[in-house]
Amino acid sequence: DLVASGDRLGHTGSDGSKPADRLSRHGRWFERASECLAYRHLSASALVAQLVVDDGMPTRTQRNTALSPEMRAVGCAVTDHPSHGVLAVLTFAGGFGPQPLNRDTVVVASQAPPPIDFKTVLDSIPVVAVHEQVEQALSRGDKVELNYKPGALKMTIWAADGAGQMYGVEWEK
């Protein structure tokens, strides 16, 4: 919008929105969100170099964001800019998925990739640790049950020997 039109530089949208506000319009971001802007570069390698070097920025904010292990999802848009040639906007988040489901449901999977109904429920859970536990369990061939309620999850993982472990987590609806 205003940045792409050349009217101004920065992270605030024409409607006063911040990067996290704009992410929320398209889904649910997990844990943290940030945005990096890069100008003047025509290639992806030059863009990445600018983010990593972050020259002229004593705090190296863009480098720290781009290389942070806590940033597990990224979206990128590139457009022409009237005075800087090219503008790239990279939006980072701890994770990103669809808006959470608004209904109670129970799903079970015992192999990767999981069935689509299981994946739909998992994708709506905004807790990265749950995604990591499920991925590890399914890669071992364990059985995973997700007992989902909006804002809460009870997860049970059964190992091959039949031993079960239950986990619970809640998040803001």
Image (cartoon, rainbow, N blue to C red):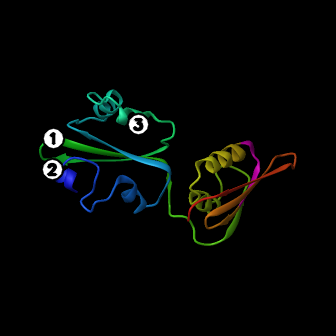
Q: Amino acid at mark 3?
A: Ala
Q: Residues within 10 Å of mark 1 (few under 14, many from 20)?
A: few
Of pointers 3 and 2, the one earlier in the residue sequence: 2
- Along the line of sight, the residue nearer the viewer: 141 or 105: 105
According to the picture, the residue beneath numbered tag 3 turns out to be 66
Residue drawn at x 67%, y 64% as measured from the top left: 148
Q: Quadrant of the C terminus?
A: bottom right
Could you tell me how far apart the alpha carbons at marks 1 and 2 are, in whole angstroms? 8 Å
According to the picture, the residue beneath numbered tag 1 turns out to be 84
- Count of number-bearing discs: 3
Q: Secondary structure at mark 3?
A: helix
Q: Amino acid at mark 2?
A: Gly
Is there CB contact under 8 Å for labels 3 and 2?
no
Of pointers 1 and 2, the one earlier in the residue sequence: 2
* 130 displayed left or right of 45: right
Residue drawn at x 12%, y 47% as measured from the top left: 82
Q: Residues within 10 Å of mark 2 (few under 14, many from 20)?
A: some
Q: Amino acid at mark 1?
A: His
Residue drawn at x 17%, y 50% as measured from the top left: 8
* 39 displayed left or right of 44: left
* 2 displayed left or right of 114: left
The region drawn magenta spans: 140-146
Could you tell me how far apart the alpha carbons at marks 3 and 2 are, in whole angstroms? 24 Å
Residue 118 position within the rendered picture, expressed as x and y whole percent measured from the top left: 65, 60
Is there CB contact under 8 Å for labels 1 and 2?
yes
According to the picture, the residue beneath numbered tag 2 turns out to be 6
Q: Secondary structure at mark 2?
A: loop
Of pointers 1 and 3, the one earlier in the residue sequence: 3
Q: Is residue 50 magenta?
A: no
